Amino acid sequence: YMGDVVVVEARDRIGGRVHNIDSDGVIVKLGAQFCHGCCNEENPLYSLMTTHGAFALYPKVLHEQWLERGRALPTEWVAGIRDLFQQMTQEMMDGVPRDPLHDKPLSAVWARAKETRGDLTPKQHAALDSLFYSEIAYCAEGHQLSYRDTGAVEIIDAPDYYVGGRGYGDLVELLAHRLVVHLQRVVTNIDTSAKPVRVEFSNGSTMTADHVVCTLPLGVLQHSLRAAQLFTPALPQDKATSILRLGMGDEGKVILYFERTFWDPSVLYFRHPLHHNFRICHPFAMTQDPNEQGWLYLMTPPPYSKQLGKLSDQEVVQRHMEIISEMWPTAPATTKFYVTDWGTDPFSRGSYSFIPVGASMLDVKRYAQPVGDQLFFAGEATSQWDPSVLHGAYASGLFTAWDILKLLHIPLPTGVWGVRQYSERDKPYEEELRLSRS
């Protein structure tokens, strides 16, 4: 059922935080580039991509190298750090409290985990922190992250895959096919005080609709709520409080191109044992695509990523090159570079959501609930079924569309992905929601 569906987009392009650019014929992925929990029937994007068949998926097999002063650290030392990190994180997860009143910052738990290993060397401390900040606290600072809800992000037990070629760009175009899309339409007010809903735009134009689905990124919505803008009448207080209680992360990317390869082309990830400002992803190791050769993707977690927005792109690259030169003293100057800054982008204000200390999945549930029968919400931050990731965003949109179909007494589709998941969307968190209410 398409009906009279209109999409309004503030940017001059579709896709939001899926953003590819063409760099002299090479697709550079500034936004989403991995399919989390892939090759599993529970993942709607995997089902969608395999149905249409034109997507190249590559398994993210961990093959990493740690370098310092131009030398690769012994594989035995790296394996030992990996094993120790796995033990420590497993112990942390085994001790996760279920009672929302006993939550604590994840950083405090991590600090305690290191204290129990009193014989760690300074280099081991730094290396463990590098793994912690890039694989657990990669979207927000550790003191912000909820220990209790650390494991609430992904419920699909399957490996991650890299989406090669044009990546998710082709999927965005596929989903937008036959839709009416208005670009560069910045919404300034959604008025649900009467029927139909009246939507106002910054250029002075208006639009009316029977139903509105708000898919603003969490950071943008929070900014609007703090400014007391956007909704007439204002959102219910408990809903607004829950939205403001959630967190918006800020992982960034610095993408560098080198005309000469000076690293091991078979390695996927590179790290420096004493720096956790970034880890380096080398897609060519997965794809063997000549177009990927020469490109390094530096993934930057907070708080470092927040500092990048205060510098020019050239200054950002210079800071990263200083560490790269410590890893590879013969590294030449980069000839192309791209720096993302999702945190200060007015149409994203962050990269993806997280659950901070003091919040819970009950806040996500309140955020996702409609206001009356006119105003609905969707997006990764509303997803009780894998928040923070792209397939959670897609699932939330699909389920919200089906909510509207039910409201209109239109039969839901059968024999497609999501029928079972739609009926069970609260099931993974029933116990947590019960504890949060109590």
Image: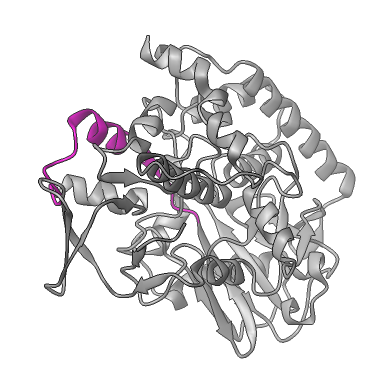
Residue 136 location (% of width, % of height):
59, 39
Residue 8's quadrant in the figure? bottom left
User: Furthest residue to the bottom?
Assistant: 24
Residue 131 location (% of width, % of height):
66, 43
Q: Nearest the camera: 392 or 27?
A: 392
Residue 415 location (% of width, % of height):
66, 45
Asked if residue 62 lies in the magenta stretch, the reply is no
Residue at image location 52% in from the left, 51% down from the top: 394
Asked if residue 239 lies in the magenta stretch, the reply is yes
Q: Say whether residue 380 is visible.
A: no
User: Furthest residue to the top?
Assistant: 438
Query: Residues in magenta?
Result: 228-251
Quadrant (top left, top right, bottom left, bottom right) of the C terminus: top left
Would you place residue 73 above or below residue 265 in this image? above
Colour convention: one colour
Q: Say whether residue 90 is visible.
A: yes
Would you place residue 395 above or below residue 157 in this image? below
